[in-house]
Amino acid sequence: MFNIGSIEELPINAIELEYALQEIAAIESMVQPHDAWTYQTLVELLKQDSISMLVVYEENNKKGVADNNVIGYCLYQVVFEQAEILRIGTHPDCQRQGIASQLFVRLNQELTSNQVESLMLEVRADNIPAIALYEQQGFAVIHQRKGYYQSPHQPAVDALIMQRVYGQ
């Protein structure tokens, strides 16, 4: 069982930032094996003022950058009163332990304090555990993109666009 030490915005310190993004890219490669975003992709995205990231660190009693294991993350974009989750992930060893739910609590606090009116995301229609989590968090399907996800020698999978509206 993993205990969350903290959920924080990305560190400003260059060494800590690099370490966190390398850990996130490693988790990406595990949870999104066919479409993982690389370290460099994350660096480029985070240069945009509208994009932010929350990072979940495993609880430990050690001091030092390398001892703060990243176990989850949420990359999101806010444009005016609209927000979109671009990526959210939890290390496979830590899934189904409430980490993503706690990430949503923190994200919702951030967004409501910034007067965001709605939050959107996209999910594969065959990702039943993620859809259940998102519905538990107040999201509803607002659109379906037929055959959006395509892989060689695999049937196409629809993309579901889900939205949570704040203040309702």
Image (spheres, rainbow, N blue to C red):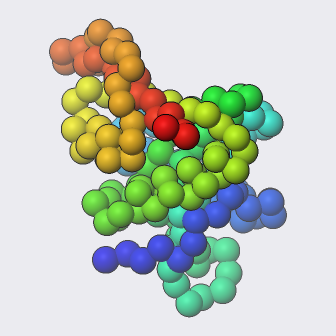
Which percent across, then down, holds residue 52? 68, 44
Q: Is residue 66 above or below residue 164?
A: below
Q: Residue furthest front?
A: 168
Residue 114 visible in image: yes
Closest to the observer, 104 or 76: 104
Q: Is residue 39 above or below residue 145?
A: below
Q: Quadrant of residue 116?
A: top right
Q: Is residue 156 above or below residue 97?
A: above
Q: Residue furthest bottom?
A: 61
Q: Residue at x 67, y 74 (%)?
A: 65
Q: Quadrant of residue 128?
A: top left
Q: Count the numbered circles shown.
A: 0
Q: Quadrant of residue 95?
A: bottom left
Closest to the observer, 75 or 93: 75
Left or right of 39? Residue 98 is left
Closest to the observer, 34 or 110: 110
Which percent across, then down, holds residue 83? 61, 33
Which percent across, then down, holds residue 167? 55, 40
Residue 148 visible in image: no
Q: Residue at x 38, y 75 (%)?
A: 2
Q: Residue at x 53, y 77 (%)?
A: 5
> Quarter of the image containing the N terminus?
bottom left
Q: Residue furthest top?
A: 146
Q: Residue at x 39, y 20 (%)?
A: 142
